Image: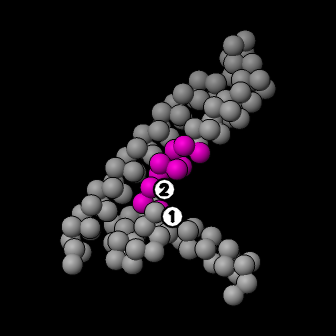
Amino acid sequence: MTSWQFITSFLYSCGKITLGLLLHPYQTMQSLIQEKAFLWLTFLPSAVFVLAKVIWFFILVPLVRYVFSCHISSFFGCALIPLFANWLVLFCVYWQILLMYLALRFFISFRD
């Protein structure tokens, strides 16, 4: 197996598990706990949160404020920035709590 095939296979697996954790977390977490190969993806919401915060503070907000001059104009997107930020934070926090609960539940259930 070449390195390109390995990278492609790894990214496909991570993407499939990520989509599973979003769409049907119960079944996906159950299989993650049983197989233990990609168990580190349990902390995916925290990584998404950190990455979103970095992009948010250093790229998106300064760009929107520079382009639309939020202090001067009455662009409605400027008012939506805090709303979307709060939504993203709450989504990541609740998603992480759900995944940690499911992980704990399946760890206890599948003890040897």
Which residue matches tag 1? 18
Question: Does the segment drawn in magenta span residue 48?
Answer: yes
Is there any visible trace of residue 7 in the rendered image?
A: yes
Residue 81 drawn at (x, y percent):
59, 29
Inspect the image, locate mark 2, and give the three-letter code of the amino acid beneath it. Leu
Residue 33, labelled with which disc?
A: none
Is 6 above or below relative to 38?
Answer: below
Inspect the image, locate mark 1, and give the three-letter code of the amino acid beneath it. Thr
Please report contact status of discs 2 and 1: CB closer than 8 Å, yes or no.
yes
The range drawn in magenta is 41-51
Residue 44, labelled with which disc?
A: 2
Residue 33 drawn at (x, y percent):
35, 71
The rendered magenta stretch, by its main secondary structure, is classed as helix
Q: Nearer the viewer, residue 9 or 37?
A: 37
Is 74 above or below relative to 9?
Answer: above
Q: Quadrant of the C terminus?
A: bottom left
Question: Does the segment drawn in magenta span residue 87?
Answer: no
Residue 2 drawn at (x, y percent):
73, 84
